[in-house]
Amino acid sequence: KDGKMSSTKEASSSGSSSIKAEVETQNLASSGSRRTQTYGDLAVVHEAAKLIGTASTPDIAINGILRLMSELLGLNRGRVLLPGGTPERLQIRYSYGLQSSESSRGQYGIDEGVSGNVMKSGMPAVVQNIDDEPQYLYRAVDRATLPRGIVAFIAVPITDGEKTIGVLAAHRLRERARAFDDDLTVLKILSTLVAQVIKINQLIDERTKELRLENKKLRGQLDTHMINHGILGESQVIR
């Protein structure tokens, strides 16, 4: 009897140790996967930051960031929406994975659709199933073009200080091991980089306009001077 009890205890102890070892193995695997994901996210942010410093145009920089989102994070059909035409309208200005016709259709009122509401509120939006969201309008991309599975949509504001100047958004499949919070965090970081590109480009445009106005003014002053005093060789002093 004592032998049977001892054998039972040993089997129980052995089983418990086996389960514990399996749990520890799973935890290690999960931890390793988490570290790999973190390194991947950091790599995307690092490459995006490099693009800002090396790209010769805003198009190259922003489209490059959207490409990284798709190829390395699975955030597909990324787009940047900015006010266009009037301050009350948003339109897709940059995109990756969209046809030109799809980008052209991507126009929204400031409070229209998911992107419009993000622009108006300045708050991010996570739609875990676009088929269940009335505010998702399928305006840019038809549902038939998207995967058959459950498709999610994430949109974050692009801000300059306290002001929302645009929206960064993308699709993803909902049934993925990667958590939505992780995608949201990376998108928020990338939106700050996109904001820098937009801000720098605006400053360059403003400075270019100022230089053109100054150049025009100087040309006008020079023309006036030439009319009043004549060209070299014809002025009263030389005569």
Image (tube, grey):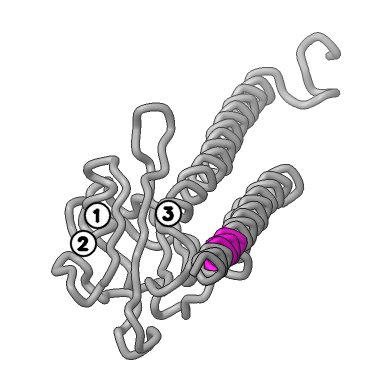
Q: Position of residue 60 (x, y in %)?
A: 65, 58
Q: Secondary structure at mark 3?
A: strand
Marks 3 and 2, the one that precedes in the sequence: 2
1 and 2 marks in contact (CB < 8 Å): yes
Badge 3: residue crowd in 10 Å (few <14, some 14–19, many ≥20): many
1 and 3 marks in contact (CB < 8 Å): no
Residue at mark 1 to residue at mark 3: CA–CA distance = 11 Å
Mark 3 sits on what residue? 168
Marks 1 and 3, the one that precedes in the sequence: 1
Query: Does the stretch in magenta take in 54?
Result: no
For image coordinates 34% across by 75% down, the residue present is 151
Q: Position of residue 125 (x, y in %)?
A: 29, 53
Question: Type of residue at label 2?
Answer: Gly
Residue at mark 3 to residue at mark 2: CA–CA distance = 14 Å
The stretch in magenta equals 11-23
**Nearest to the observer: residue 94 or residue 12:** 12
